[in-house]
Image (cartoon, rainbow, N blue to C red):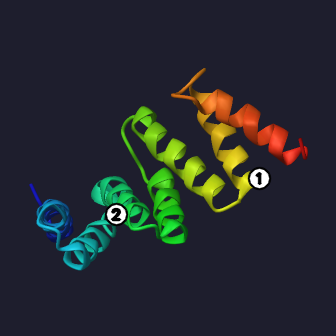
């Protein structure tokens, strides 16, 4: 049967999933601040951390807030997921955001991580080659 700790964990998980759903509704309605608050609450629970952090990263990126976007992409990249493949778009977007901020070395590191998981992803290899040339001063 269930003990009290199980019941609390279940409640927290339900609340986090409700916050995630609420965040998406707020976002669709253009209520950005409310969406961000809901996603931030959802990001505190391990099971919804990835989706919430990714949503927050995309929200900040769409508003040109790249430093905040990078921070949330990194949290999404570090979150537990059942399948590593779901993190590929996050790593790609993280690399792109870092590159936009002029953080070439960090962008390179993320692209190398991505390409170590999958032989090619979108234009990650071309992006990597270009960054290596930029980094070498070419």
Q: Quadrant of the N terminus?
A: bottom left
Left or right of 62 in this view: 103 = right
What is the count of numbered marks?
Answer: 2
What is the x, y in percent for residue 17?
A: 17, 60
Left or right of 40 in this view: 121 = right
| CA neighbours of label 1 inside 10 A, class few (<14), some (14 to 19), many (20+) | some
Q: Quadrant of the C terminus?
A: top right
What is the x, y in percent for residue 107?
A: 67, 50
Looking at this view, name the residue that lies furthest to the front.
138
Considering depth in this image, is 90 or 8 the residue closer to the camera? Answer: 90
The alpha-carbon separation of the residues under discs 1 and 2 comes to 24 Å
* Tag of residue 105: 1
- The image quadrant that residue 128 belongs to is top right
* Tag of residue 7: none
For the point 51% across and 28% down, the residue is 122
For the point 74% across and 36% down, the residue is 130
What is the x, y in percent for residue 134?
A: 81, 45
125 w.r.t. 132: above or below: above
Q: Are marks 1 and 2 in contact (CB under 8 Å)?
A: no
User: Tag 2, which secondary structure?
Assistant: helix
Looking at this view, name the residue that lies furthest to the right.
137
User: Tag 1, which secondary structure?
Assistant: helix
The first of marks 1 and 2 along the sequence is 2
39 w.r.t. 121: above or below: below
Considering depth in this image, is 136 or 53 the residue closer to the camera? Answer: 136
What is the x, y in percent for residue 5?
A: 21, 69
Looking at this view, name the residue that lies furthest to the top.
119
- The image quadrant that residue 114 belongs to is top right
For the point 44% across and 55% down, the residue is 76
**Which residue is under mark 2?**
59
Left or right of 103 in this view: 48 = left
């Amino acid at each position: 049967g269930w003990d009290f700790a199980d019941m609390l964990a279940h409640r927290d998980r339900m609340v986090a999933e409700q916050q995630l759903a609420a965040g998406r509704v707020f976002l669709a309605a253009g209520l950005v601040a409310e969406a961000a608050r809901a996603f931030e609450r959802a990001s505190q629970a391990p099971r919804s951390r990835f989706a919430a952090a990714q949503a927050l990263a995309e929200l900040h990126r769409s508003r040109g807030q790249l430093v905040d976007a990078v921070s949330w992409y990194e949290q999404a990249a570090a979150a537990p997921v059942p399948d590593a493949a779901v993190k590929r778009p996050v790593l790609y977007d993280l690399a792109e955001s870092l590159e936009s901020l002029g953080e070439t070395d960090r962008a390179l590191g993320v692209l190398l991580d991505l390409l170590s998981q999958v032989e090619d992803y979108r234009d990650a290899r071309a992006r990597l080659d270009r960054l290596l040339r930029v980094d070498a001063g070419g």
